[in-house]
Amino acid sequence: MELPIYQHIIEEIKKKIKEGVLKPGDAIPSENSLCDTYGVSRMTVRKGLAILVNEGYITSIPGKGSFVNEPDSKKYILYYNEMANLINTIDTTKLIEVKIILPTPRLIDSLNIPQSKKIIMVKRIHYSNGEAVAYDEKYLIYYKGMPIVEKEIKYSTFPEIVSRYTSLFAIKKELTISAQMPDEKISKYLSLYNALPLLVVEQRLFNTQDKPIGLGITYYRGDSCKLSASWPFTDME
Amino acid sequence: MELPIYQHIIEEIKKKIKEGVLKPGDAIPSENSLCDTYGVSRMTVRKGLAILVNEGYITSIPGKGSFVNEPDSKKYILYYNEMANLINTIDTTKLIEVKIILPTPRLIDSLNIPQSKKIIMVKRIHYSNGEAVAYDEKYLIYYKGMPIVEKEIKYSTFPEIVSRYTSLFAIKKELTISAQMPDEKISKYLSLYNALPLLVVEQRLFNTQDKPIGLGITYYRGDSCKLSASWPFTDME
DNA sequence: CAGTGGTCTAGACCACGTG
DNA sequence: ACGTGGTCTAGACCACTGA
């Protein structure tokens, strides 16, 4: 064992939790008693506990102690990349339209903007092995000096487009995933002739003040898109 | 400012990253120089940097320094609860079938088990406001002594069922999300008479040794289920 | 009051990467 | 050889909790 001491401590506690020796709600030994049992200084113990807190295993309460958490069985990490999913990777993209428009009522509502604000609209069709597999529409609030370079827009994901002029760390993102039937327009774009459902991913971007800055909707052929999510996201050895 | 010093340091660095003063790939000042600029001890600086590392803002490389990360624009946190989503909450559940079966070829493949292994199969229909909105099938590898209590199965999510006999911290989970058309059986269960797509969520559970222990497939009416995901997951002030 | 976790210090030694 | 981050110590003071 040449692991750092704190790793050692972490693993022993994790093991007890996973085996059920320590159950949700149980107190784990106090920092000082852990110092004694491992013969280390308090900062070392605390380093280990901090990581367990961070990974969601325990919670520390000042004045009381540290306790095993109720695991949050509802959280998963989702990998979403507009251009690649479990079934397909998009190899070609056709720009149908890039235009500066005034917002439709839906956009005014959805982006929470005045009617006079200009919007960049982008419509694209994505292909995989020569077949149209997705159609997307993006709406981005226009600001003066915003560079709009067709070549850059064409092959970029929504966050990539936005990152041309803002740090991605300053952006919040929300996805909504649903299943829908295609309307006529989308059926045409994707050459769908029989009943084929769509996997629809709606992507909203916000700035640090929670003001909407963009909306993107991507319509995937149901038979050519699967999304995947997993847990846990830490210790994925 | 009565914030801890390390929080102060964190926020100043975060601010610089969000404003673009520090860009991905840039080095942040060394720990010792941060000690000087803030007039604090090294452990305090390190505490702050550790959090920035943890939140994905920076990466520290021994012998070199700490650097601003390329933000991973593909990760989202997905909240998935079989019983509740953006549109509906399931209020009633009907158990159609609970049975111990031998695995079908698909299950043998999917759960990676011998043909002789017994499987618990559960089929349920979920209702919201009196309407059937989802149908699900669950397959769980049976072990001796596993309690099967109908009442407990009826209203439980898949992870909850499993948590009766294993710590949830010892389980890995994977979701696959897709859009499909219902087959006849599901159309009947959900009383679907016109073309309505399904949002299908496949859930796989694994133990700590990455051996599959369960498979669940939930079929939601497309018009009554939306999933949501977001980023970032930390600092959601 | 004693015990808990939260913050912080001023040192130390190590392994690593670069000149 | 020097600077970097990684680990660790042996103290300290604080605010909080519970008996």
Image (spheres, coloured by chain):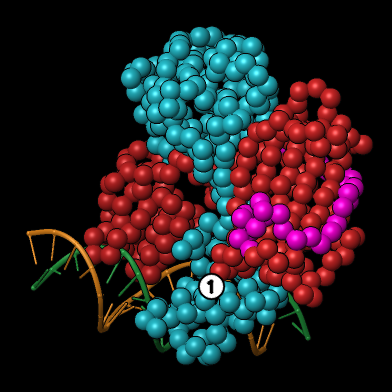
Chain colours: A cyan, B red, C orange, D green
Q: Nearer the viewer, residue B14 or B40?
A: B14
Q: Nearer the viewer, residue B57 or B87?
A: B87
- Asked if residue B112 is among those painted magenta in the image, a careful observer would answer yes
Q: In which image quadrant can residue A177 be found?
A: top right
B95 sits to left or right of A122: right
Q: Amino acid at mark 1?
A: Leu
Q: In which image quadrant can residue B173 be found?
A: bottom right
Secondary structure, mark 1, is helix
Q: Residue at point 36% right, 48% down?
A: B69
Q: Is residue B159 above or below residue B164?
A: above
Image position, residue A114 (x, y; %): 58, 14
Q: Residue at point 82% right, 50% down?
A: B123
Q: Residue at point 59% right, 31% down?
A: A223
Which residues lie in the magenta part?
B86-113
Across the whole image, how many numbered discs are drawn on residues?
Answer: 1
Image position, residue B164 (x, y; %): 77, 68
- Asked if residue B54 is among those painted magenta in the image, a careful observer would answer no
Residue A72 seen by the camera? no
Q: Is residue B32 above or below residue A88?
A: below
Q: Which residue is tagged 1?
A: A49
